[in-house]
Amino acid sequence: MSIADLCERIQAAWVSRAISESTWGYPLIGALHVLAIAIFGGAVLIPRLRAETRWIRRIGVALVVLTGTLLFASGAVRYYESTSFRIKMALLVLIILNTVAASRTRGKLRWAISLALWAAVIFASRGIAFF
Amino acid sequence: MAELIKQSLWFPAIQSVHIIGLTMLVGTICLLDLRLLGIGLRGRPVGDLASALAPWTSGGLLTVLVTGPLLFGSDLTRYLSNPAFVVKMLLLAAALTGHFTLHRSVVRNDGMTSPARRKIVAILSLIVWSGVVLSGRAIADFDIRVV
């Protein structure tokens, strides 16, 4: 089964259809996605608050991933075909790699890389509507 | 310039900067509110946390106040006829007014503010700022398309 077929099946699942066929599903989850990004983003900005904001970041990430997955599922084929979405996913992989590396050495450079990658993710996300 | 922004990739680019700005602005305010509620960052005095966050909050505010009007100016008709936009502007007015009055006085006079007052202010702040973000995102879903 190809990835495109898998996306078809994801999109046809009941959760996905419940979102795409309802009036409020997509707007509500989309809005929560952005709100979760804001909460998470605020907590990653300042490196010296890192230890104290751990749980806030964890909740933020969990919410972003959950809402993001639901949004993806509601239109999996369209997202899969979007170049911008693919770039976004690649950037997220880089962020994960950077985070794994950063947990060993907490350099300022890695923090700067992380912020730059997050900014790029936001650009790529907005781009989904266009290409 | 309005046409250029509206009909090119400048629009999503400016939107992206707007979202980065809102993350800085609302994210840092939320952190401070959670601290005021005693939910997180309890080891750090309110004043100390506020001064650590302040440059990011101001930077975020400046960013959204520059990019927002650019987006708005690119298509006045679209925004003015969009109910989510109108709701957002009302919430934004409330959020900004509260931020520079009630919120600021609670943060600055932390030792002298009653716990009930600071909790109410923090909850109100979380509600209105979340409302600004939620209604802002909803602008995309409430376009009245002229066919």
Image (cartoon, grey):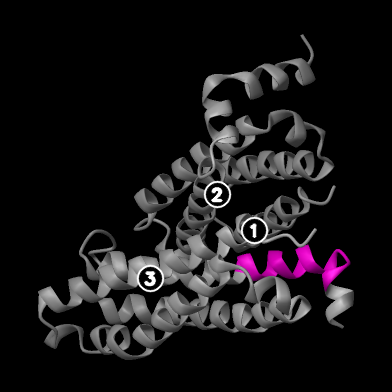
Numbered disc in front, either 2 or 3: 2
Which residue is at a point 66% across and 60% down the rendered structure image? B143
Viewer-proximal residue, B15 or A62?
A: B15
Same chain, labels 2 and 1: no
Residue contact at pointers 2 and 3, CB within 8 angstroms: no
**Farthest residue, direction front:** B147
Per the image, the residue denoted by label 3 is B128
Where disc 2 sits, the SS reads helix
Q: What stretch is highlighted in magenta?
A: B6-20
Which residue is at a point 64% across and 62% down the rendered structure image? A112
Q: Could you give the CA–CA distance between mark 3 and mark 1, rounded to whole angstroms?
A: 20 Å
Q: Is residue A49 left or right of residue B135?
A: left
Q: Could you give the CA–CA distance between mark 2 and mark 1, rounded to whole angstroms?
A: 8 Å
Chain letter for mark 3: B
The amino acid on which the numbered mark 3 sits, given as a three-letter code, is Val
Residue contact at pointers 2 and 1, CB within 8 angstroms: yes
Which residue is at a point 75% across and 29% down the rendered structure image? A77
First of labels 3, 1 by sequence position: 3
- Whether residue A16 appears in magenta in the rendering, the answer is no
